[in-house]
Image: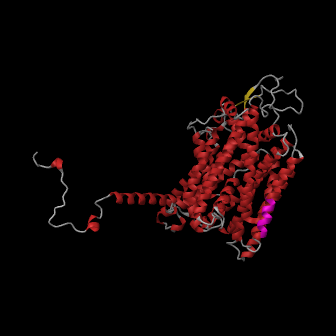
Amino acid sequence: MAVTSFALADYVVFALMLVVSAAVGIYYAWVDRSRRNPGNFLTGGRKLTALPVSLSLTASFMSAITVLSFPAEVYQYGANIGFYGLSYLMAMLITSEVFLPIFYKLEITSTFEYLELRFNRATRLLGTLLFIVQTILYSGIVIYVPALALNQVTGMNLWGAVISTGVVCTFYCTLGGLKAVVWTDVFQLGVMIAGFLSVIIASVILQGGVINIFSDSQHGGRINFWDFDTNPLRRHTFWTVAIGGTFLWTSIYGTNQSQVQRYISCKSIAHARLSLFINLLGLWLILLCAVFAGMCLYSIYKSCDPWTSGLLSALDQLMPYLVMDVLGDYPGLPGLFVAAAFSGSLSTVSSSINALAAVTVEDLIKPYASMSERQLAWISKGTSLLYGVLCIGMAGLASLLGPIFQAVISIFGVIGGPLLGLFTLGILCPFATSKGALSGVVLGLAVSLWVAIGAQIYPPPPEMSRPLSLTTEGCNFTMTDSFSWTSTHVPTLQNSTTTAPVPINSNRPALADWYSVSYLYFSPIGTIITISVGLIVSVLTGGRELNVESRLRLTKEDTSLYYLFKFIKDRAMRRKRKLDLKKDRKKTFGNPNPAFCDVELDLPQSSVST
């Protein structure tokens, strides 16, 4: 099925990416050999600066699924997922003003420590276990899915890619800790952007310019930004992406250990806030590259869709197929894109391994065992190794379960919604009790999982997901294996135009519409139910009499907006004092002459005759 196969130069580029990543781990293991303590291993000694942390934040959840699936999403459904840019902005503002100040001033390593301080140990353990399960599942998929897509298109050895990336990732996480993870993320983010740009530049040259690509996308209905339908059953509109995306990314940046652990490792809260907003620029850049790459896909294959024609078995294979098509004659460039895809996997899995080690040590070992700093440091390394092996094993399990694991990716987002609600209860609701928190998160998780699983069994109808039309009318299947789909030969098959196939269960229950709600609303559903139930139960269990420490809840002094408003107010007052000539007149000039009547003359009301 491959247009061309991997050349030696491609393998060299891919191997070089793995070698550099491993070298960073060796470097930080050597540099920090004399500082063996869990704080240095898990949080970098809290001495990191904004720039590397911001790039690491960007790379952590821009996985290979982003590199492969986002362009395919634009190809099939259109570019309105570009509204994620707005949800990124809202998520950074909320995280910076609500969650970051609490976690930073408490100087905690695990976000779930907060849950015990605010509620009780049972709440902390529940949050920790949910995070561990979802992260191991997600990490296995992140390793396996891109390897499968690349194997089927490029011919790259599947398990060689899975095991090599898993081993290298585990190696530098175990040796170098958070510092190695952060700096390899910086390198891998550069590789991801370079891979994207290589494909985009080649596609633009092939299609004769950016304007042609936009024109093709416009005619094909892919530039569909102006969809403001408020129907929650619609898969992607401005409202589903902006609102649902805000909840989703706030749960990731505000409460997910992988992200929180990075910005609380900064040397000051100012650096932590700055890292979030520099990271925002990185997110926008990756999103722009992904959306435009999807437009390039459509522009090139607008007349002959490789998926509908049966040449590809999944949409995730479109980007690798395009790479081998347009870059196959340039040794090393296909390898650069593959390195970009696996850089996304490495950055995500390394973040996950480091975060899993942190919550295991801080939440499951330290509270129950008395150990020295040196012992805890070695246990941190051991848990990193253990979770690396588990993630590789989960990749193997993903290969056995097949399509079922696609549902797990949605469930990963679903679990984040109730956890976001749980932390929001603690930080913003001073009368929330431990009973209310536990009741809310359990019910929120149950409902959001119920909806997500129902959506997998009863997928939404095409009129709600609205896949755009794909055609094979320009295909020529009489060509040899060296045929390039960018050619313009006369087709020999009967023309066909189709939309993406959507499996529909004819026995849809009465709740089918409830299951058809946009997948981006799974997270808001979990968050809102958790907060609502938590508040009701808290009021009924004496929450109004609860006295919570100020350090555990958000105060106005914790937010930068308070100081910004205070600064603006002070400037305005100083300016007003400068303009008020009567203010402090007695203090400045002394008492007036008692014989002089200091009264202003009001001529319009004067009774003096003229």
Q: Residue 18 occupies which quadrant of the picture? A: bottom right
User: In terms of depth relative to the viewer, which is nearer, 235 or 433?
Assistant: 235
**Closest to the observer, 30 or 154:** 30
- Nearer to me, 543 or 609: 609
Residue 314 figure quarter: top right
Q: Is residue 28 magenta?
A: yes
Residue shown at the point (35%, 59%) measured from the top left: 578
Q: Residue 158 in the image: x percent, y percent? A: 86, 48
Quadrant housing residue 486: top right
User: Looking at the image, is 374 positioned above or below residue 486?
Assistant: below
Quadrant containing the C terminus is top left
Q: Of 326 and 543, which appears nearest the observer?
A: 326
Q: Does 508 sit left or right of 7 as displayed? A: left
Residue 424 visible within the image: no
Q: Position of residue 151 (x, y in %)?
A: 84, 45
Residue 73 in magenta? no
Which residue lies at the image location 79% right of the left edge and 33% below the top edge? 306
Q: Which residues are magenta?
A: 21-30
Q: Main secondary structure of the magenta part?
A: helix
Place of residue 590 in the rendered image (x, y in percent of width and height, measured from the top left)? 25, 68
Residue 249 in view:
yes
Q: Quadrant of the N terminus?
A: top right
Q: Position of residue 95 (x, y in %)?
A: 58, 56
User: Where is 98 relative to 523, above or below?
Assistant: below
Picture layout, residue 391 above or below residue 200? below
502 vs 254, left or right, is right
